[in-house]
Amino acid sequence: MNICETLTTNKTTIFIDPVLGDGGSLYPCQEELSKEMYRLVRKAHVLTPNPTEAALLLGEKPSEYGVQKDGTISVALAEDLVKDLASAYSRTLPIIKSVSEDDNIGVCVRFTPDNTDHLQKPVTETILARRSGNVSVGGTGDLFASLLIGKWLIQSLSV
């Protein structure tokens, strides 16, 4: 945990893609790791959990948020979940992966459009794309988080 304090400045953005569970369940043998993950996510500026992890971070059962056995969540329920995450982790930009509607899959994010205006109300956006077949591919959440960090770095370096 000290690495966050040691290696960060006021210009550092901390991304955390928590590793807690999927498909509505906590990963086996994760109790000790999950305790540390709950502490670590408090340091995040950008948090990219799947629906199972998002519910667990809120201390809830994933089924109470409507997380499906395939790990996905509906748009309406994802919007509730991302609002709750934003409220619980106030300085964090939460992005929930595996949001599903019909044949589409995507992400749901809660943010304030202009970070300099603290009076501006946060908005919730859901971005969906057509699913390519009815197949579930492991690692797509990791790929999403990596692409997000890459894009963020490119934008940060060009400023």
Image (spheres, rainbow, N blue to C red):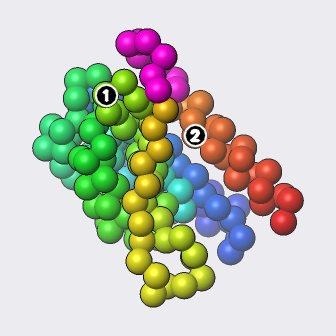
**SS label for mark 1:** loop
Q: Which residue is drawn at 62% across and 66% down?
A: 5
Q: Residue at x 47, y 65 (%)?
A: 111
Q: Name the residue under label 2.
A: 145
Q: Nearer the viewer, residue 26 or 95?
A: 95
User: Toward which corner of the image does residue 145 lie, by quadrant?
Assistant: top right
- Point out the stretch of residues depicted in magenta: 130-140
Q: Is 70 placed left or right of 5 in the picture?
A: left
Please state if 135 lies on the left or on the right of 62 as rendered: right
Q: Which of marks 2 and 1 is nearer the N terminus?
A: 1
Q: Is residue 87 above or below residue 79?
A: below
State the residue at coordinates (31%, 28%): 102
Residue furthest left in the image: 64
Q: Nearer the viewer, mark 2 or mark 1?
A: 1
The secondary element bearing badge 2 is classed as helix
- Give the residue displayed 54% in from the left and 70% down from the top: 113
Identity, as a three-letter code, of the amino acid under mark 1: Asp
> Quadrant of the image for the C terminus?
bottom right
Occupied quadrant, residue 117: bottom right
Residue 58 percent location from the top left of the image: 26, 54
Dot 2 amino acid type: Ala
Answer whether labels 2 and 1 touch (C-beta < 8 Å).
no
Q: Nearer the viewer, residue 130 or 1?
A: 130
Position of residue 53 measured from the top left corner of the image (x, y, whole percent): 34, 41
Q: Residue 102 carries which label?
A: 1
State the image coordinates of residue 125 (x, y, percent, origin top left).
43, 55
Query: Going by the image, does 54 lie left or right of 114?
Result: left
Q: Can residue 158 be seen from the camera position used here?
A: yes
